[in-house]
């Protein structure tokens, strides 16, 4: 599963336009939400691999959204990357403490975001490969145990 789906969440349309522009040249599918509640309403239907999440939003801030995502077993695996103007060490640490995997401070370099997303894509591809290898190894082990059991029954019969 390569990184194909990204959900960007920001209450400022200009910020969403910048993200759309940056990701335009990359082969990622992008959806946008303009609030925390909108994000939570659409996330399970869209199932992005990464959520780019602003912190400062009305109704529900990004920290609250991240907590809700990580508390839900259906969405806990989604990578959350805060993209916020709040850049003090305390604010970044708060982001990590609620479950975010990364934090980029606005204004950020376009190449920085692209590089981070490309790296995440590679990690997800490798994770998928490892999961497939584990699945194959487990299947092989179960088949070997089943065959061994059958052989034991044949030996006992003879």
Image (tube, rainbow, N blue to C red):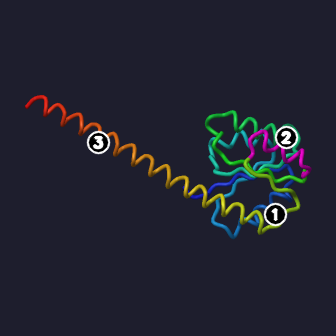
Residue 92 image point, x, y percent: 85, 48
Q: Residues within 10 Å of mark 2 (few under 14, many from 20)?
A: some
Number of numbered discs visible in the structure rendering: 3
Indicate whether residue 25 is drawn in magenta: no
Mark 1 to mark 2: distance in Å? 20 Å
Callout in the foreground (1, 2)? 2
Q: Nearer the viewer, residue 140 or 19?
A: 140
Residue at 83% from the left image edge and 66% from the top image edge: 109
Asked whether the beta carbons under mark 3 and mark 2 sit within 8 Å of each other, the answer is no
Q: Over which residues does the magenta segment extend?
A: 87-100
SS type, badge 3: helix
Indicate whether residue 91 is drawn in magenta: yes
Which quadrant of the figure has residue 96?
top right
Residue beneath disc 2: 61
Quadrant for the N terminus in the image: bottom right
Residue beneath disc 3: 144
Residue beneath disc 1: 18
- Looking at marks 3 and 1 on the same chain, the residue that comes earlier in the sequence is marked by 1
Mark 3 to mark 2: distance in Å? 52 Å
Residue 5 image point, x, y percent: 64, 55
């Amino acid at each position: 599963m390569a990184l194909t789906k990204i959900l960007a969440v920001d209450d400022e349309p200009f910020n969403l336009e910048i993200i759309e522009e940056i990701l335009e040249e990359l082969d990622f599918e992008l959806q946008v939400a303009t609030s925390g509640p909108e994000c939570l309403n659409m996330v399970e239907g869209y199932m992005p691999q990464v959520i780019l999440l602003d912190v400062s939003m009305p109704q529900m801030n990004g920290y609250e959204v991240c907590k809700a995502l990580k508390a839900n077993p259906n969405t806990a695996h989604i990578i959350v990357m805060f993209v916020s103007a709040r850049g003090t060490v305390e604010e970044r640490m708060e982001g990590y403490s609620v479950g975010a995997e990364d934090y980029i401070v606005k204004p950020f370099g376009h190449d920085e975001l692209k590089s981070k997303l490309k790296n995440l894509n590679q990690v997800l591809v490798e994770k998928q490969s490892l999961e497939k290898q584990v699945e194959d190894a487990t299947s092989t082990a179960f088949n070997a145990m089943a065959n061994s059991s059958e052989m034991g029954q044949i030996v006992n019969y003879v």
